[in-house]
Image (tube, helix red, strand yellow):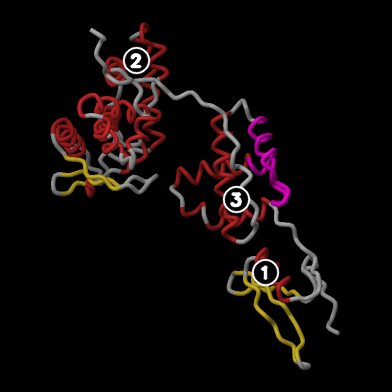
Amino acid sequence: MGRKPTVNLNLPPYMRRRAWGGKVYYYLRSTIDGKRKEFPLGSDFILALRKYTELVVIEAPCHAVTFSDVEKRYQAEVVPKLAKNTAKIYRSDIRHLLETFKDAPLDQVKPMNIRMFLDDRAAIPTTANRCKRLFSTMWNHARGWGYTDLPNPCEGIKGHSLDKRMLYVTDAMYNAVYAQGSASLREAMDLAYLTGQRPADALRMSEHDIMDGYLIITQAKTKQPLRITIAGKLAELMARIHERKAAHKIVTAGLLTNTNGKRLTPAVLRNHFDEARKKAAAVHPEMADAIMAFHFYDLRAKAADDTSDQRGDQAASDLLGHGNVKTTQRHYLRRGKIVGATK
C-alpha cells in the first residue's frame, strides 16, 4: 500500500497530477503483476476524470462540470483567436454570465435559467441578448469538448425584441459635422463613407493595401476580402491623403493620420468626431438633436443606403462585404424602397 497523498486531495484514488514543461498532466497509477505503472489521462482535468472513470472499475468521486470549467477553457483556447475588439466584448459579456452561472453544474442549467437571466437584464436588452448568444456558443464548445451531452438550453428561448436603428445620416448632417472637423476627421469620414467599411477596418487601411488600382481590404470581423476600385471621389481622397502626409516628416504606411502625421488611433478619432459633432450642433440648432444622435459607425449604413439608391441592394451588399443581401437589407438599409405612386 502506497503512502497517503498529502497534496491534490481533490483527486480520486490513484489519480496523480504532475506539472511538466509549464503544463499540468494527470495520470492513473496502478499496480500490475507487482509492478507500478502509470496511464496518462491527458492535461484537461474534466476529460481526465472521464477517462479515469472508464479505466477504474470502482465508482469514482465525480467532479460536476460547472460553467466556470467551460469558461476557463473558452478563455484560454477560443477568445485569444478572436479579433481584438470582439475578444474585448466577449470578456465583458463573460463577466455578466459568471455573475449568474459561475458555479452552476451544466447538468442543472435549464432553459428556464436562460429566460430568467434575460429577464433580470431587461434594462440592458442588447447586452443581455449578446450574452445569451455567447452562452449558446460556449455550450456548443462544451459539447464538442465532451463536457456535456445535454442539449443547448438556449434553444427555443427568444431574446429581447430590439428596435432597428433607423437613423439615416443626411447630407446636411454629414456636411455640418464635416465642416467643423479637423483634416484628420474629414479624411476618416470620407474613407469610411466611400468604402462602406467599419471604423476599425478604415483605421487599419494602409498604402500597402493599394495594388493595381484597387484598395485591398480583408475585414477583421468576418475575414471577407474585398477589392474596391480606386476611382472618382475615392481617387480624389487618396490624392488628398498623400498630399497631407507628404507635408509631415513622420513616415507611416497608414492612410489615416492625426494632425502630427502619426497613424490615427480609435481614441483620437473618437475625440475629433465628438468635438466636431458638438460644434456642429451649436452652429445648426435646428438639427442639433439629429446631429448629436449621429455616430461615426452610422456612415457604414449611409454608404449602404446611398449605394442601394444608385445601384441597387446587391451593390450595397457587395460593398459592405456581406455574403447575403438579406443581411444588408435587415441591418443597414434604413431609408426604405423608392416606389412610385398609385397614379
Q: Residues within 10 Å of mark 2 (few under 14, many from 20)?
A: many
For disc 2, the marked residue is 280
For disc 3, the marked residue is 139
Give the Cα separation between the discs numbered 1 and 2.
62 Å
Taking depth in this image into account, of 279 and 329 the one nearest to the observer is 329
Residue 274 sits inside the magenta stretch: no
Could you tell me the amino acid type at mark 2? Ala
Give the Cα separation between the discs numbered 2 and 3.
47 Å
Q: How many marks?
A: 3
Q: Quadrant of the N terminus?
A: bottom right
Q: Specify whether 16 is left or right of 191.
A: right
Q: Which residue is drawn at 24% across and 32% down?
A: 194
Q: Which residue is drawn at 69% across and 67% down?
A: 50
**Residue 87: percent from left, percent from top:** 49, 46
Q: Can residue 251 be seen in this view?
A: no
Q: Earlier in the sequence, mark 2 or mark 3?
A: 3
Q: Which residue is drawn at 75% across and 83% down?
A: 30
Q: Specify whether 303 is left or right of 82.
A: left
Q: In this view, does 89 lie above or below 298?
A: below
Instruction: Choose mark 1 or mark 2, whichever is in front.
Output: 1
Q: Quadrant of the C terminus?
A: top left
Residue 15 location, quadrant: bottom right
The segment highlighted magenta reads: 97-120
**Residue 142: percent from left, percent from top:** 60, 55
Mark 2: which secondary structure? helix
